[in-house]
Image (tube, rainbow, N blue to C red):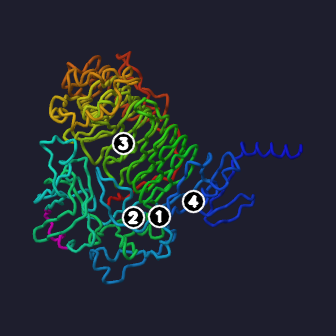
């Protein structure tokens, strides 16, 4: 009896101290230590589910190398505490075919060759995908899809990657954009039917794609019989891209007609390109996939003929966490999928550590829940957004406890160009700290909700392709109180006054936000504040910017008619959606109760104080009666300040001891620790390509 009791106690101790492990090895090679081995991650999750009563904690350890995720793997709420990690560095979860020794062959079939430009035919190679290679995949080869601003898309087209780089679907022009010569029919305008449009201005009409002309009619003749051509562009606004299928081409009229309307209609001189055209496969790094025949045609650079090839297939998220608890995902690489890497809904205590996310289709991580952390991860060449993080409770202003820290985000929005930021925050109390975000076409970070902390991040070279946008952005909500943007380093966010590129943009009456102790270097405008109330901008330093701030009063200007009617105004609806007259709102944000009665529409309660402007003009504050402007100093270039300027512009330093004091005469100016912004450790992940082909569809 005593021996049995000892054995039971020993078993209990083992259960609480040593997690039960299962190894994922596609070769199913037995382990010498007797650890269970399965061939797939889905099989490992099933093993844990089957044995969940036999241990307190579990591990799924993946062997280094490629693990195909042919169907999305679901982690259910009833799983015990679980860690999924790489047995040793190098486990790769891939959502597509990976071919290590590709058999690229010259194109010899005359009928096939006739589709391609004559000058490129000798360079073309084809890769045939045997039917067996596509067996077992939940998704198949897919061509272009309708996508863009305001268009929900779960997955993009199948893409081609060589040596870890996304190649470019054959397109015209090869880089940048062409421009619309003239619009002969703008098509219908779905935006005009929106519920927030005043009823007198609302227009509801059947969908009708627009028609426009270009000057190069010879190209139109070549494209006339293209089987599946698409047009992608900024058809009206700089911030509203959309990819639309072409329904017809008329070479004689020089016109192209789209199958669906753009949200805002078409305008002359709009920027666009045409894609998925074998007739335009005319430069190294371009490709076209015949999805019916499962053949890839590409102009493969000679140095890449024997490099690894990947073709994305999976549309569903690679990992889905449904109401899961106490899950850690660590040291894995997520690659080559058409959709998301991780979708986590209503989760608790999730950790995603030291993972890399590269060459994905839509989004790397979408997580809604509480007390979860994303740390030391690398996000590169993501088709859409990096991390969408939500949690907390707005009714009670309960914070989520979620954090993103020490991560690097580069080249997010690779395919989905607008409103797919590196980071999106909503809910209450998310913290984003010590990250680096760079090289995005549009916004770096979008937030909504309350009481987020955005600090010690380094954000640069963003808003590169779009306008009327900011590196950090929020808008059209009076109730966004409590968010703190502090001690961040913004630099090299260039642009022009005509296109409204900014480092921080509080758009369309966004209110209750504090922006303090940030350093803005070589930004077009440091800040644009669109008429909001109770916004505090203090103790920031603006260096070599075109202007420090533009703070307007649009609520009594052009926007006045949009906010007059509570039945249609988004601002009124957002105000009514939260209990501003109940606790804790009533005590924490008492001024919200006065927004409709005290100087309606004006930027009451805002301030621009204690800021340093070095080689930067102030800009304009349109309503100084409502926006307090005090204790700011403009420092001109002289011998003393030139030294400071040179020090800042050349010392993008990682030394945590570096602080910035704008001028010795400003003794009460708080130091800005710009040297300690960005990741405190180097995230582990796949090497970042030094040169990459933009994979726009």
- The residue nearer to you, when weighing 684 against 586, is 586
Q: Position of residue 570 (x, y in %)?
A: 25, 37
Which residue position holds label 2?
A: 158
Which residue position holds label 3?
A: 444
User: Within 10 angstroms of label 1, few (less than 14), some, or many (20 or more) residues?
Assistant: many
First in sequence, mark 1 or 3: give its number: 1
Bounds of the magenta segment = 213-221
Q: Is residue 481 left or right of residue 468?
A: right
Q: Is residue 337 left or right of residue 419?
A: right
Q: Which mark is residue 42?
A: 4
Q: CA distance from mark 2 to mark 1?
A: 9 Å
Disc 1, SS? strand
Do the numbered discs 2 and 1 sit on residues whose CB atoms are within 8 Å? yes
Q: CA distance from mark 3 to mark 2?
A: 26 Å
Q: CA distance from mark 1 to mark 3?
A: 28 Å
Which residue position holds label 1?
A: 96
User: Within 10 angstroms of label 3, few (less than 14), some, or many (20 or more) residues?
Assistant: many
Mark 3 vs mark 4, foreground winner is 4
Disc 4, SS? helix
User: Within 10 angstroms of label 4, few (less than 14), some, or many (20 or more) residues?
Assistant: some
């Amino acid at each position: 009896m005593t021996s049995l009791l000892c054995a039971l106690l020993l078993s209990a101790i083992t259960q609480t101290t040593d997690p039960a492990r299962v190894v994922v090895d596609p070769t199913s090679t037995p382990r010498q230590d007797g650890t269970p081995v399965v061939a797939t991650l889905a099989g490992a999750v099933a093993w844990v589910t089957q044995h969940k009563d036999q241990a307190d904690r579990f591990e799924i350890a993946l062997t280094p190398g490629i693990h195909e995720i042919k169907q999305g793997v679901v982690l259910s709420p009833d799983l015990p505490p679980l860690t999924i990690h790489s047995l040793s560095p190098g486990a790769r979860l891939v959502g597509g075919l990976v071919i290590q020794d590709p058999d690229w062959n010259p194109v010899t079939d005359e009928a096939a060759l006739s589709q391609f430009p004559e000058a490129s035919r000798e360079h073309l190679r084809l890769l045939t995908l045997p039917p067996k290679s596509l067996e077992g995949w939940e998704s198949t080869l897919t061509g272009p899809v309708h996508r863009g601003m305001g268009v929900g898309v779960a997955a993009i087209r199948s893409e081609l990657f060589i040596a870890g780089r996304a190649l470019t679907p054959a397109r015209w022009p090869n880089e940048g954009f062409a421009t619309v010569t003239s619009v002969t029919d703008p098509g219908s305008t779905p935006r005009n039917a929106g519920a927030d449009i005043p009823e007198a201005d609302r227009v509801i009409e059947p969908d009708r794609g627009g028609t426009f002309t270009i000057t190069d009619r010879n190209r139109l003749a070549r494209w006339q019989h293209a089987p599946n051509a698409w047009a992608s562009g900024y058809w009206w606004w700089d911030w509203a891209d959309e990819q639309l299928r072409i329904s017809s081409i008329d070479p004689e009229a020089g016109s192209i007609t789209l199958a669906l309307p753009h949200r805002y209609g078409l305008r002359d001189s709009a920027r666009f390109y045409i894609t998925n055209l074998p007739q335009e496969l005319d430069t190294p790094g371009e490709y076209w996939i015949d999805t019916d025949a499962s053949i890839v045609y590409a102009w493969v650079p000679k140095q890449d003929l024997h490099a690894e090839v990947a073709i994305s297939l999976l549309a569903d998220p690679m990992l889905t966490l449904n109401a899961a608890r106490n899950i850690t995902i660590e040291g894995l690489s997520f690659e080559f999928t058409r959709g998301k890497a991780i979708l986590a809904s209503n989760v608790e205590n999730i950790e995603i550590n030291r993972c890399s996310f590269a060459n994905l289709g839509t989004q790397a991580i979408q997580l809604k829940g509480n007390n979860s952390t994303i740390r030391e991860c690398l996000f590169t060449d993501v088709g859409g957004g990096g991390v969408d993080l939500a949690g907390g409770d707005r009714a009670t202003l309960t914070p989520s406890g979620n954090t993103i820290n020490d991560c690097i985000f580069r080249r997010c929005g690779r395919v989905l160009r607008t409103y797919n930021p590196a980071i999106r925050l909503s809910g209450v109390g998310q913290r984003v700290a010590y990250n680096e975000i760079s090289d995005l076409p549009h916004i770096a970070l979008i937030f909504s909700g309350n009481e987020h902390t955005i600090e010690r991040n380094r954000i640069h070279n963003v808003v590169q392709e779009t306008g009327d946008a900011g590196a950090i952005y929020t808008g059209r909500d009076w109730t966004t109180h409590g968010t703190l943007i502090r001690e961040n380093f913004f630099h090299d966010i260039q642009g022009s006054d005509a296109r409204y590129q900014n480092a921080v943009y509080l758009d369309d009456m966004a209110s209750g936000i504090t922006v303090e102790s940030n350093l803005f270097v070589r930004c077009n405008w440091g800040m644009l504040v669109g008429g909001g109330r109770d916004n505090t901008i203090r103790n920031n330093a603006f260096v070599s910017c075109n202007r420090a701030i533009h703070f307007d009063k649009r609520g009594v200007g052009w926007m006045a008619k949009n906010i007059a009617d509570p039945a249609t105004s988004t601002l009124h609806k957002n105000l009514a959606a939260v209990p501003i007259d109940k606790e804790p709102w009533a005590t924490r944000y008492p001024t919200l109760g006065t927004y409709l009665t005290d100087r309606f529409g004006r930027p009451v309660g805002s301030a621009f104080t204690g800021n340093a402007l070095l080689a930067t003009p102030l800009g304009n504050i349109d309503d100084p009666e409502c926006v307090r402007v005090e204790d700011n100093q403009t420092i001109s270039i002289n011998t003393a300040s030139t030294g400071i300027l040179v020090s800042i512009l050349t010392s993008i330093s990682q030394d945590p001891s570096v602080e910035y004091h704008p001028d010795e005469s400003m003794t009460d100016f708080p130091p800005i620790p710009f040297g300690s912004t960005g990741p405190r450790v180097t995230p582990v992940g796949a090497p970042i390509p030094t040169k990459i082909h933009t994979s726009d569809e």
